[in-house]
Amino acid sequence: MFSIRSQICACSVCALALLILAFGFRPALSQAASGKADQIRDADQAWMRVFAAKDLEKSLAACAPDAAVLAPNAPIATGREQISHLFQGFFAVPALQISWHPTQVDVARSGEIGYSTGVYEMHFTDAAGKPAADTGKYLTVWKRASDGKWQVVRDIFNSDLPAGH
């Protein structure tokens, strides 16, 4: 028969062993997740560059075939055809200059889906012909395609400016 003291000691050793097993592999997982987060960050910035260049074909190629873009004051654009119309509207804005950068990127444990969230800034000429600017935030959901590339599956953004500006 074991004493209570020896049972507590045995339970403590087992708990410690479980903690070591559970967290001992964490750095390797973190490195893998970090590498995928870097890939998403790179994909996010590559998309920004082709969008800022008003390259419709490459901007659409960054999106999955069933992607959806949730732009403010507009219906959801689902699929590349609707997204193409939405992007063409953006590209037609006079003197449009846009940039964005992620402030946070994360990847699911599965490594198949992740997100980037950050801030954007754009300058353009308004309907009255005056220079205008907008800043805001965005959230983009990325999915790893069968070829290993990250594609946009959902994108939403909105302005930091008060309504009516």
Image (spheres, grey):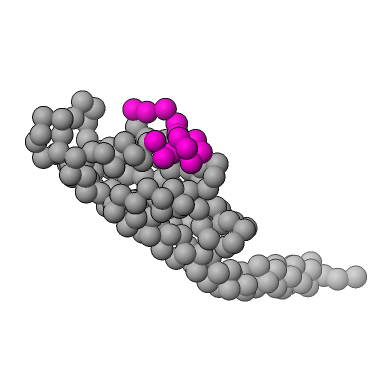
**Please, is residue 148 above or below residue 127 in the view?**
below
Name the residue located 32 percent from the left edge and 57 percent from the top edge.
49
Above or below for 147 versus 81 = below
Task: Note whether residue 159 is visible.
Answer: yes
Asked if residue 75 lies left or right of residue 162, the reply is right
Residue 84 shown in magenta? yes
Q: Residue at x 41, y 50 (%)?
A: 57
What residue is drawn where x is 36% and y is 59%? Answer: 45
Q: Is residue 70 left or right of residue 10?
A: left
Q: Residue at x 34, y 39 (%)?
A: 88
User: Residue 102 location, x and y as percent?
Assistant: 35, 55
Residue 145 inside the magenta-drawn segment? no
Q: Quarter of the image for the N terminus: give it.
A: bottom right
**37 or 46, nearer to the observer:** 46
Dividing the picture into quadrants, the one containing residue 72 is: top left
Q: Is residue 157 in view? A: no
Which quarter of the image is occupied by the C terminus? top left
Q: Position of residue 4 (x, y in %)?
A: 79, 67
Q: Hey, which quadrant is residue 26 in on the image?
A: bottom right
Q: Position of residue 75 (x, y in %)?
A: 42, 27
Q: Residue furthest right?
A: 1
Q: Is residue 130 left or right of residue 55?
A: left
The correct choice, above or below, for 106 with respect to 93 in the image is below
Q: Which residues are magenta?
A: 73-85
